[in-house]
Image (spheres, helix red, strand yellow):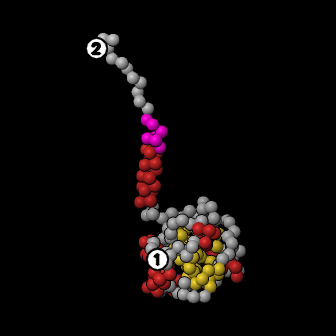
Amino acid sequence: MFLSETIETPPRRPSRKMLISVGVVAAIVLITVVSVLTGGRATNSPTNVLVGKNVKGFTLAGLNGGKVRAPWESGHAGVLIFFASYCGPCKSEMPQIATYIRTHSPSPVEVIAVDADDKVSPAKSMIKKDDVTFPVASDPNGNVTTGIFGFGALPESVFVNAKGVVTQVYIGAIPKKQLAGGIVKLKSA
């Protein structure tokens, strides 16, 4: 072989690991952009897998004593507000919900908050500070939050008719307008 001759090597292809890494980064960027554009909220009531499904009832300890039962077990429609004291969006959502419920009667629809995977003391402090007057259930092990409803992130709001069928799910901190609209729909169902 002469010095002036060069050996050509075929072009190097990206490895599978590299392609997967690029795909993951692109997916994260896309999710972040969508989250920023939507304010971190999404109403996917029509497409949520829970909508139209019958959910089983439950009884949990009340955060301030007693028991809290799923409203549909006694023939009432209900709104479940899943929250936790460590959840940033929940901290801004709960005072607004509490104020709305104190100033607008949801009856005959029952509104219940479900404190998920949380410590009792900070949760009690939060609901006291926010002047929550509706029932608050404690779900320290997530049996209802993840077991029945399959939620992994908070806050979440679920609208369930008197027969135990989910009619709407709101992912993220629910605005008063969405809460009010969901309650009106349950009242007229």
133 or 183: nearer the eye?
133
Residue 168 visible, this angle: no
Q: What's the amino acid at mark 1?
A: Ser
Residue numbers of the magenta segment? 14-20
Which residue lies at the image location 44% right of the left edge and 59% below the top edge?
A: 35
Predominant secondary structure, magenta span: helix
The quadrant of the rendering that contains the N terminus is: top left
Name the image quarter holding residue 169: bottom right
Q: Which mark is residue 3?
A: 2
Q: Position of residue 96 (x, y in %)?
A: 46, 79
Reply yes or no: does residue 60 show up in magenta: no
Count of residue discs:
2
Residue at 54%, 84% (x, y): give it: 63
**Can you say whether 1 is above or below 85 in the image?**
above
Which is nearer the N-term, disc 2 or disc 1? Answer: 2
Q: Secondary structure at mark 2?
A: loop
Dot 1 lies on which element? loop
Q: Tell me the residue that label 1 is attached to.
A: 85
Asked whether residue 147 is in view, the answer is yes
Crowding near the residue tagged with mark 1, few <14, some 14–19, many ≥20 C-alpha atoms within 10 Å = many
| In the image, farthest residue toward the front | 1
Give coordinates of residue 81: x percent, y percent: 55, 75
**On the picture, is 60 further left or further right than 87?**
right
Residue 15 on the magenta span: yes
Q: Residues within 10 Å of mark 2 (few under 14, many from 20)?
A: few
Residue at position x 44%, y 32% from top? 13
Provide residue 91's location: percent of width, then percent of height: 44, 76
Q: Residue furthest top?
A: 2
- Three-letter amino acid code of the residue under disc 2: Leu
Give the quadrant of residue 15.
Answer: top left
